[in-house]
Image: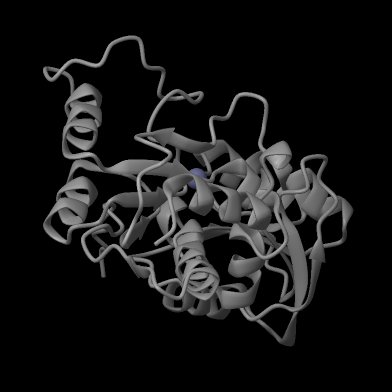
Amino acid sequence: MPTVREIEQALFALAPKELAAGWDNVGHLLGDPDQTVKRVLVALDITEAVADEALAAGCGLIVAHHPVMNCKWLPVQTVRSDTPQGHLLLKLLRSGVSAICMHTNLDVTEGGVNDRLAQVLELADPGPLGDPEGLCRMGKLTRPMTLEAFARFVCKALGANGVRYAGAGKMVERVAVGGGACGEYQEFAIAAGCDTFVTADLTYHTFLDAAGKGINLIDAGHFPTEDPVCETLVSYLTERFPDLSVRKSASHREVIQYIIND
Ligand SMILES: [Zn+2]
């Protein structure tokens, strides 16, 4: 059985640590590196429910995308059971469950979050968009379609509860993608001649300005645009460590619900 350290090394072979942003916190963040592991749970985030699922299934390791501690939005000053984050970290530590997080390094790497997103959206000839961080990808639809038809396709392909879109009324053919909060890269999609950009966490004003900038925008949600990479991690680890039992979390799914007026 592999150790947590060996699994971390294998994951860094897929998504090298040097690719991570300076503010990020990636790799084996919690637990004993020499612990051997039989079962691994893969999830986009380590929530309290994901931790409970790992415990119930006897998983000694959780592999996640978003860091469980100490990145830009989640500073850790204390680990106390009376805060939600402290409660979670203590639960993992007390139960001997390790955590490995592969974040911006997995966004950027070949075969990572954004290549997976381009694949799920069936983009032909996928390649880099040319943004400075190397996050986003672009590709072509085999058949052009209207923005509404493409938005429906995206919603279905990603299993999203809903998508938000606005745009220039252009037919969709040349598509840029950036999983998670990649709205700031829309200028690169425009510069690359893309008619449509699929990303998440867009604001009202960004949608409002889309038509004037000549681009269609689709916000398909942070979870739906990134979660497909979990399957990549499951197959990668299963292939690298045939004795290891690796599965995707069944409890972690999109939390955002939509009500639509007919
Ligand atoms: Zn994300």
Asked where in the image residue 41 lies, by quadrant, the reply is bottom left
Q: Residue at x 25, y 63 (%)?
A: 261
The structure residue drawn at horizontal position 26% and vertical position 70%, both measured from the top left corner, is: 262
Q: 209 and 123: which one is in front? A: 123
In the image, what residue occupies the spot 38% across and 72% down?
A: 159
Residue 40 on image: x %, y %: 34, 59
Q: Nearer the viewer, residue 232 or 262?
A: 232
Residue 167 lies, with reference to residue 102, above or below; the image says: below
* Quadrant placement of the N terminus: bottom left
From this view, report whether residue 244 is shown above or below residue 141: above
Residue 181 percent across, percent down from the top left: 55, 43
- Name the colour scheme: one colour
Measured along the vertical axis of the image, is residue 42 above or below residue 119?
above
Please state the horizontal and vertical placement of residue 34, each as a whole percent of the image. 41, 41
Q: Out of 39 and 115, give the one closest to the viewer.
A: 39
Residue 217 visible, this orientation:
no
Q: Position of residue 27 (x, y in %)?
A: 53, 39
- Tell me if residue 1 comes above or below residue 148 in the rendering: above
In the displayed structure image, the side of residue 126 where residue 1 appears, left or right: left
Query: Residue 104's image quarter?
Result: top right
> Residue visible at 23% across and 51% down?
50
In the image, farthest residue toward the bottom:
143
Q: Is residue 242 left or right of residue 78?
A: right
In the displayed orientation, state which residue is furthest to the top.
Answer: 77
The answer to whether one can see residue 5 in this image is yes
- Quarter occupied by residue 244: bottom left
Q: Is residue 151 rendered to the left or right of residue 187? A: left
